[in-house]
Amino acid sequence: MNADDQFRDRMLSLGLARVSEAAALASARLIGRGDQNAADQAAVDAMRTQLNMLDISGTIAIGEGERDEAPMLYIGESVGTGQGPVVDIALDPLEGTALTAKDMPNALTVIAMGPDGSMLRAPDVYMDKIAIGPGYPTGVVDLDMPPRERVLKLAKAKNCRADEITVCVLERERHVRIIEELRDVGAAIRLISDGDVAAVIHCAEAESTGIDMYMGIGGAPEGVLAAAALRCMGGQMQGRLLFRSDAETGRAERAGIEDLDRVYTRDDLVGGHVIFAATGVTDGSVLRGIRRRGEFLESETILMRSKTGSVRRMFYRTPVDRA
């Protein structure tokens, strides 16, 4: 029996959704309270508790740092009951801690699970990324193209003009040149303050989100999570690790990465069949945030399986005193 057969993704998918929901509900009480660390800690604690209820022998492949940074869910941490399939887990208990603290859009709880060895152990460094949705020829855009060429190539593949392409970019000083070049070619730009996992998901649902492409430099762990989502929804992605110091290079080497200049495809970042869940914390263009209705809290979760290509949107209601 191979790793995918042992994984039992169908049986585990609802449990993964519960993990994501619990983290979102826990952090929701801190929306708009100005304390991003407290919101993150609440999500971490709830996510760890729920993960440890699952019948898995899980290892955190993508987490919130190394072991000495506990009590965060750290890389290499073991989770689950230990009774069940051996799995890799990638997670961000609260993607958008600042968004939550400021009650801004698109804060999510995010988690993905796959068979043992299915996820790149990406170190906590930067990654240059590009992503588009499904339905395009393989390699229509890539990291070695300048931003202008990426837009023109995608517009040609989409049979539209360059000024009909919308690109999502993190609003950072390091992206000034990219933004200038995109505007020179006529592309529209949606700038975001945080949340590049959600931004990549937008590309896979371009008809509803209006986002055709994501590009720019963000976290490498978030790149793996985004790749897991695209494994389920379809779409292309490339990423290249970026290092700013010898310490970061050493972190990659300890993670077993030998080719520091390698361009990773979506399937290099996440292989095999995976499941992915995300729950909205604040309202956004992908998911509705946590809402209070009288004595109840309501959440919306997206749950996806790459094996079947299924995408479910799940609404959950729970009494406030049990959340």
Image (cartoon, helix red, strand yellow):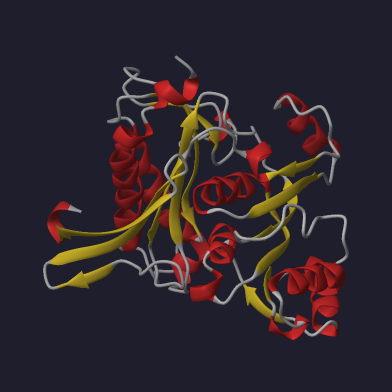
Residue 211 lies, in percent from the top left, at 60, 73
Residue at position x 56%, y 51% from top? 230
Where is the C terminus found, in terms of image quarters? Answer: bottom left
The foreground one among 232 and 91 is 232
Is residue 86 something one can see in this rendering?
Answer: no
Asked if 166 appears above or below 47 in the picture, the reply is below
Residue 22 lies, in percent from the top left, at 30, 49
Left or right of 6 in this view: 67: right
The foreground one among 32 and 265 is 265
The foreground one among 137 and 48 is 137
The foreground one among 188 and 273 is 273
Residue 144 lies, in percent from the top left, at 87, 55
Query: Residue 313's image quarter?
Result: bottom left
Where is the N terminus found, in terms of image quarters? Answer: top left
Query: Residue 302's image quarter?
Result: bottom left
Residue at position x 33%, y 44% from top? 19
Left or right of 101 in this view: 268: right
Residue at position x 46%, y 36% from top? 113
Left or right of 252 in this view: 259: right
Asked if 35 appears above or below 273 in the picture, the reply is below
Is residue 209 something one can see in this rendering?
Answer: yes
Residue 114 lies, in percent from the top left, at 48, 33
Left or right of 260 in this view: 320: left
Residue at position x 47%, y 60% from top? 36
